Image: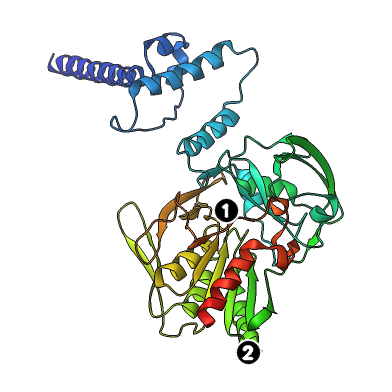
Amino acid sequence: MKNRHFVRTVSIVAICSALTFIFGYFFSVINMVSWDVFLTQPPLYWFKPQYALFFGEDEVSSSDIKAYNRVKNILDARYYEEVDFNKALETSIKGLAQGLKDPYTTYYSPEEMKQFLETTSGNYVGIGVSVHMDENYLLTVADVFANSPAKQTGILKNDKIVKVDNEDVTGIKDADLIVKKIKGTPGTKVRITVYRPDIGQYKDFEIERRQINISYISSEMLKDKIGYIQIKQFDDDIAGDFEEHLNDLIAEGAKGLVIDLRDNPGGDYNQVVKIADRIVPKGLIVYTEDRYQRKDEEYSDARELSMPLSILVNGYSASASEILAACVQDYGKGTLVGNKTFGKGLVQAIDTQFENGGGLKYTIARYFTPSGKCIHGEGVTPDIEVALDEEFKSVSIEDIPHEKDAQLGAAIKAVQEKIK
């Protein structure tokens, strides 16, 4: 009798526990996905293994979560063909990153991440342009390299690249992904469609990919013993090259110096710090600061440049170029000449620890000048603002005759006055 009572009690407890678990499970699920989603699914569906995305109630609106689930449910049940939710979810993850409205934060699919991580040497196979994203997220040609396929076929500075091999790339917010589509195997051809703002027309170019041998730095002696160094980009050994060019000019008797950073999109952070260290006196060069106000500071030693200096900048001078220009300006070591710079002062990191092989490039901090000014979104304003003549708006800097270059003329004049 006691055994029968014990068995009945255990059975009741077990049934109640099971019902409590089932009720709790379905209550939690219904609370997340809503009744209308729950009722449209067959009963067996809810006993299958489920995956979930988690947000705190203070992070997102519950109505948006329900809307997301409703869209998924409608597409699953009523879309005219079977839905590949893996592909749809991949796009959704991209949207999560794009929702930040930060063009430098991007989710890469496994295939895109594989392409992104492909190693390249100092040379690369492509068409010979440097690019940046404009304010409308259109890939814009910032410079066309000398003797490159792009220059030979007629690509111009300021052209907007809208198609690559007939694929519309205007919806891609990350410049690196479009550049990867342009690069390829030597000898193959790529079809590039550009929009040319100056004439309001689209133009198609079929360009052969070639090994591009880029010299990112050049120098010469100008009149009145004024040295001139153009830096097109801060690659991973530019600081050593800068030191060599500077020493050569000093050996030739240079009395002043013009550094040309026009159309320079930036590059290696450590390299620009080394170049700034050679120019400015002992002190802070630049620092980064994250959301928690943690700082990472870079300092120069006591050695500094002891001659009058001008630095040329324009709207395509970005990132590392702005670090150098702002540092020189803050210390009063030189005169900035040209146009206001681009205003890119963010630091990125890449997370590759994704189980699916994807990755995330994301912004982790902002750059600040020695005086504490944030470059991002503001740019650096020159001490002397000078515009190029209209005829040179689409011309590469090295193709502008020195005697017709109004910005270079103003930079030379500023150095001459300090020499006197």
| Residue hosting label 1 | 315
| Nearer the observer, 274 or 3 | 274
In this view, 115 is above or below 215: above
Viewer can see residue 267: no
Residue at x-position 49% and y-position 52%: 343
Helix, strand or loop at mark 1: loop
Q: CA distance from mark 1 to mark 2?
A: 32 Å
Q: Is residue 412 left or right of residue 207?
A: left
First in residue order: circle 1 vs circle 2: 2
Which is closer to the viewer, label 1 or label 2?
A: 2
Q: In the rendered image, which quarter is residue 69 located in?
A: top left
| Nearer the observer, 37 or 1 | 37
In this view, 39 is above or below 25: above
Viewer can see residue 192: yes
Residue at x-position 80% and y-position 59%: 148
Residue 378, given in percent of the width and then of the height, sits at: 44, 51
Q: Is residue 144 left or right of residue 59?
A: right
Q: Is residue 158 left or right of residue 92?
A: right
Residue at x-position 54% and y-position 64%: 337
Residue 5, given in percent of the width and then of the height, sits at: 15, 14
Helix, strand or loop at mark 2: loop
| Nearer the observer, 122 or 343 | 343
Residue 369, given in percent of the width and then of the height, sits at: 40, 63
In this view, 253 is above or below 199: below
| Nearer the observer, 193 or 11 | 193
| Residue hosting label 2 | 253
Q: Extreme right residue here?
A: 187
Q: Mark 1 belongs to which amino acid?
A: Gly
Q: Mark 2 belongs to which amino acid?
A: Gly
